[in-house]
Image (cartoon, rainbow, N blue to C red):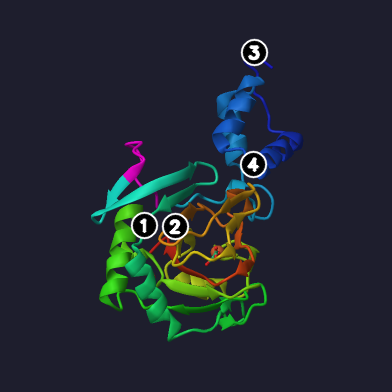
């Protein structure tokens, strides 16, 4: 396909682009593939930018800015808030970073102690009023700390803000979950489905969730990995370690599907920080 005649965007081309993006190829990869098969760049770009489908396609959703740790030095450990934190694993797509020693044992124990007193059956955001209700997919118990509610929480939050380059006020209060043997959290996305009832009310308080940091507050005797089914990755729950992942749009294409595998022996305690696009109120 060369020459100077104007190429046109056929329905087949649109469908092909939609498929490629749906399979997780980036816009840049699709553009490169089109160019190498003879499409003029201007036409390829126009085709890529055309709105398609009902608006729920990842292709038409604008990517959000997401928190991102500065790992540019390529160092195996980072100094964060005076602590030497290990960079144990990084993945670029989906974006996942596993950290060792983000929290000290004492900090983990103090968070467990503070949370224990306040545990109630976990709730997830699911009701038609945009409120909360008990969700059988999550069989743990949980509570939220208020942002900045104690010296410990402030210390942990400022460490996370430093690590993620993301302001403290662009995050929800830390959530602590306790899983007993057999308890699990089935695979899910942390972003809010924009189509669900009550989404508007939730999104008004700080926009979408764009990243998650799960910190392990203890080491269960068996089971309880954080699992990423799309990429078949299991992260071991080790006290003081953490897994960070981000998702720049509320779409499965982010491959941010994850869950907590059943705890087999002992308990599992985690603290989760959800990062928002804007100021969470
Ligand atoms: O417990 C885990 O490993 C995952 C927790 C989780 O997915 C969440 O808190 O959103
Ligand atoms: Fe989650």
Q: Nearer the viewer, residue 127 or 17?
A: 127
Over which residues does the magenta segment extend?
66-77
Q: Secondary structure at mark 3?
A: loop
Instruction: Give residue 102's mark.
Output: 1
Spatial separation of the CA atoms under disc 1 and disc 4? 35 Å
N-terminal-most mark, 1 or 3: 3
Of tags 1 and 3, which is closer to the observer? 1
Asked if residue 79 lies left or right of residue 191, the reply is left
Query: Percent x, y for residue 142?
Result: 51, 78
- In which quarter of the view is residue 137 placed? bottom right
Of tags 3 and 2, which is closer to the observer? 2
N-terminal-most mark, 3 or 2: 3
Asked if residue 50 lies left or right of residue 280, the reply is right
Q: Which residue is mark 2?
A: 242
Spatial separation of the CA atoms under disc 3 and disc 2? 55 Å
Q: Determine whether 109 is above or below 253 in the image.
A: below
Q: Are marks 1 and 3 in contact (CB under 8 Å)?
A: no
Spatial separation of the CA atoms under disc 3 and disc 4? 28 Å
Q: Residue furthest top?
A: 3
Q: Which residue is mark 3?
A: 3
Spatial separation of the CA atoms under disc 1 and disc 3? 58 Å
């Amino acid at each position: 396909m060369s020459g100077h005649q104007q190429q046109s965007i056929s329905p087949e081309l649109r469908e092909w682009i939609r498929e490629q993006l749906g399979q997780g190829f980036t816009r840049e990869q699709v553009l490169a593939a089109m160019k190498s098969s003879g499409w003029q760049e201007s036409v390829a770009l126009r085709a890529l930018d055309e709105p398609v489908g009902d608006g729920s396609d990842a292709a038409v959703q604008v990517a959000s800015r997401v928190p991102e740790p500065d790992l540019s030095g390529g160092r195996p450990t980072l100094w964060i808030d005076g602590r030497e934190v290990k960079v144990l694993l990084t993945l670029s797509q989906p974006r996942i970073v596993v950290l060792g020693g983000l929290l000290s044992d004492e900090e983990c124990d103090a968070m467990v102690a503070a949370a224990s007193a306040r545990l109630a059956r976990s709730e997830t955001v699911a009701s038609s009023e945009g409120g909360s209700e008990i969700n059988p997919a999550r069989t743990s118990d949980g509570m939220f700390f208020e942002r900045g509610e104690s010296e410990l929480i402030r210390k942990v939050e400022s460490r996370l803000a430093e690590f993620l380059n993301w302001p403290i006020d662009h995050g929800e209060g830390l959530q602590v979950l306790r899983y007993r043997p057999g308890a699990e959290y089935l695979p899910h996305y942390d972003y809010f489905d924009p189509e669900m009832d009550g989404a508007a009310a939730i999104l008004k308080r700080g926009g979408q969730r764009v990243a998650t940091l799960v910190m392990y507050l203890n080491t269960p005797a068996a089971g309880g990995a954080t699992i990423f089914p799309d990429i078949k990755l299991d992260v071991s729950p080790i006290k003081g370690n953490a897994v960070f992942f981000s998702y720049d749009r509320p779409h499965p294409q982010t491959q941010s599907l994850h869950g907590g595998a059943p705890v087999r022996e002992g308990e599992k305690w985690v603290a989760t920080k959800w990062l928002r696009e804007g100021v969470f109120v």
